[in-house]
Amino acid sequence: MALFSKKEKAPHNFMLKDHPTKREIRWDIFRMAWPSALEMILVSLCGIVDMMMVGDLGSYAITAIGLTNQPKFLILALFQALNVGCTALVARSRGEGRQDTANTATSSNLIISIILSIVLSTIAYFFVYNLVGIMGGDAQATYYGALYFKYILIGMPFNIAGMAITAALRGVGNTKASLYMNMTANLVNVFFNYCLIYGNLGFPQLGVAGAAIATSLGFVIAFFMGLFILLRKKQYVYLSREHKSIDKEVVRRMLRVGTPTMVEQLGMRVGQFIFTRIVAGLGTVAFAAHTITINIESLSFTTGQAFGVASTTFVGQNLGRKRPDLAEEYARETNKVGFAVAVLIGLLLFTFAHPIVGLYANEAEVIALTAQVLTFVSLTQPIQCYYFVTASSLRGAGDTRYTAMVLLISMMILRPSLAFLFVIVMNFGVMGAWFGITLEQCFRAVMVFFRFRSGKWKLMKV
């Protein structure tokens, strides 16, 4: 496997050309983005497979898993500051030729992530019913949601530590490593889903709890694979005995870049909590349709996220080399390629909405409503992709305060307000909720467009 090649000592030099042609730039984008796209698809599949395989248990099981999303993402949001800061600092250090700084950032982020994740997961475990209960589901969905979340929390420290590892590897352009990690994790997840949800191959039948156990086992396997990768010195970032403590100055630099992103994510979760409460009030069928749509869309917007990862790395490394012209060129070309792929994905969702939804549910009412929402969502894919790529370009430059401000305004104020208007006041149901999401995404896309065009991001310090 190329992941462990002896040539890894000086990886990804294709990104460091002084005068690349447009064809070379686009080829660089493709080579960077496809492993990230596959990786993120696999991450999304982890949740998608859980939902598909518990779908036969009934809409209550789908709703139960959906209720855990916001508490789970709220915990993960706390680590965004370090992960975004780590990726940006590693990418900038790679461009400057400062391998020592890149390695120190990697080890410091990993140590903090392990310690803090254990503390937070333990606290959340003892308050799991409260965390799931405030999401507004009925008694049955809340009970099974709490049961599911308990087992997810056990594996969460491994998940968070694995994310810290991939954050560093992405900074040097090694997107294949996290691809292999998540590919293995998902194979583990699918196998144990089969065994534990329905009691196959002699395993106990655990239902929703079995799906969570399978997911957590995947987290564990992915973490140890990532740790093995970082313990090998045949690559640009690695762990050694010299990297066993936390460097306060490096952490300060990572937090300077990443703290706005953490605030952004926390604000987004508050807005999502209010939004989810509004939709949950529509009933089990409507919330199941909403949850399935989010689940399917999580697979589609991985394209935008993957091209965003590529743009973050390209922008960070080229600014580190004092080449803002190339940073801008890579960002623009990444957007063009991402837009074309997003249009294709939108067409696929539009054409195959009913068959896709049929994989999740067997209740006619849920299938019909979800397919209607998904058909509308298919039209929004290019807007969504543009936002992901452009915002990631700004973050790669260290311009995280602006992106945080935009997301805070849109998620904490605009999205809940539009949901209240369309769902409660105008009584448009779950479709109204998605009208609100689309308008809010358009706002974000317009805001990052003007920021990128201003060029202020080229002057940011990391």
Image (cartoon, rainbow, N blue to C red):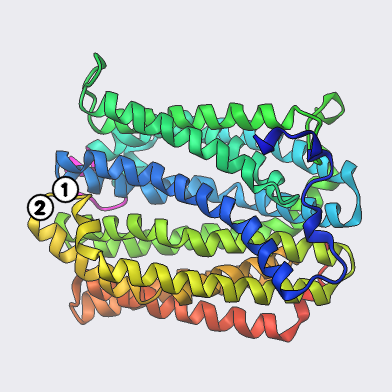
What whole-number distance in Å separates the C-alpha atoms at marks 1 and 2?
A: 8 Å
In which image quadrant can residue 282 be found? Answer: bottom left
- In the picture provided, is 115 more to the left or to the right than 95? left
Q: Against 382, is 368 above or below? A: above
Q: Which mark is residue 59?
A: 1
Name the mark nearer the viewer: 1 or 2.
Answer: 2
Q: Against 356, is 196 above or below? A: above
Q: Residue furthest left?
A: 364
**Residue 145: x and y, percent?**
28, 40
Looking at numbered disc 2 in the image, what kind of residue is underneath it?
Answer: Glu
Q: Nearer the viewer, residue 35 or 135?
A: 35
Q: Which residues are magenta?
A: 134-143
Report if residue 213 lies within the magenta region: no
Residue at image coords 77%, 62%: 316
- In the picture provided, is 167 more to the left or to the right than 431? right
Q: Are marks 1 and 2 in contact (CB under 8 Å)?
A: yes
**Residue 393: x and y, percent?**
67, 69
Secondary structure beneath dot 2 equals loop
Residue at image coords 18%, 77%: 427
Earlier-in-chain disc, 1 versus 2: 1
Report if residue 138 lies within the magenta region: yes
Looking at the rendered image, the quarter that the C terminus falls into is bottom right
Q: Which mark is residue 363?
A: 2
- In the picture provided, is 243 more to the left or to the right than 305? right
Residue at image coords 16%, 65%: 369
**Residue 95: x and y, percent?**
86, 57
